[in-house]
């Protein structure tokens, strides 16, 4: 696991542990909140302290999801709400975030970040 600290962007929506985050033009992080952000994901928020965000950028991470059908081995991509979902044939142009390690429980799933 590699965790790095970043400054929170002033324009970011509220970030919670398990949310996917992306980098902005000022090298600050935002919660993924639109389609463009899904191409700029740098990792998963593990903790927020004031205007600092700890971001897991490699290794196993617990990520928020609403896709309860995920199975170990599934490839996952970012949703526009900062969660992950299973890669489908319709997602050809979306960046793969990682691979599912365990089935989802209570809105969270463990993935191996790519």
Image (tube, rainbow, N blue to C red):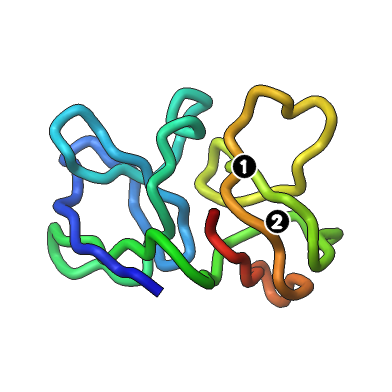
| 10 Å crowding of disc 1: few (<14), some (14-19), many (20+) | many
Residue 79 drawn at (x, y percent): 60, 40
Q: Nearer the viewer, residue 93 or 48?
A: 93
Q: Residue 2: which numbered mark, if any? A: none
**Image spot of residue 50 (x, y percent):** 14, 64
The numbered mark at residue 96 is 1
- Position in image of residue 108 (x %, y %): 63, 69
**Residue 62 versus residue 100: which sits nearer the camera?**
100
In this rendering, position of residue 110 left or right of residue 59: right
Q: Quadrant of the C terminus?
A: bottom right
Q: Is residue 79 left or right of residue 10?
A: right
Q: Residue at x 70, y 56 (%)?
A: 66
Element on which disc 1 rests: strand
Between 98 and 80, the residue placed more toward the observer is: 98
Q: Secondary structure at mark 2?
A: loop
Would you place residue 102 above or below residue 95 in this image?
A: below
Q: Residue at x 38, y 47 (%)?
A: 42
Q: Which residue is mark 2?
A: 66
Q: Residues within 10 Å of mark 2 (few under 14, many from 20)?
A: some
Q: Quadrant of residue 23?
A: top left
**Pointer 2 or 1: first along the chain:** 2
State if disc 1 and disc 2 touch (CB < 8 Å): no
């Amino acid at each position: 696991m590699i965790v790095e600290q970043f400054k929170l962007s002033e324009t970011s929506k509220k970030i919670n542990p398990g949310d996917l985050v992306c980098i902005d033009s000022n090298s600050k992080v935002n919660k993924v909140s639109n389609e463009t952000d899904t191409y700029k994901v740098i990792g998963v928020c593990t903790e927020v302290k004031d205007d600092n965000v700890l971001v897991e950028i490699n290794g196993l991470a617990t990520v928020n999801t609403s896709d309860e059908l995920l199975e170990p081995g599934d490839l996952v991509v970012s949703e526009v709400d900062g969660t992950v979902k299973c890669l489908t044939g319709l997602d050809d142009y979306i960046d793969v975030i990682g691979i599912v390690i365990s089935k989802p429980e209570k809105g969270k799933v463990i993935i191996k970040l790519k």
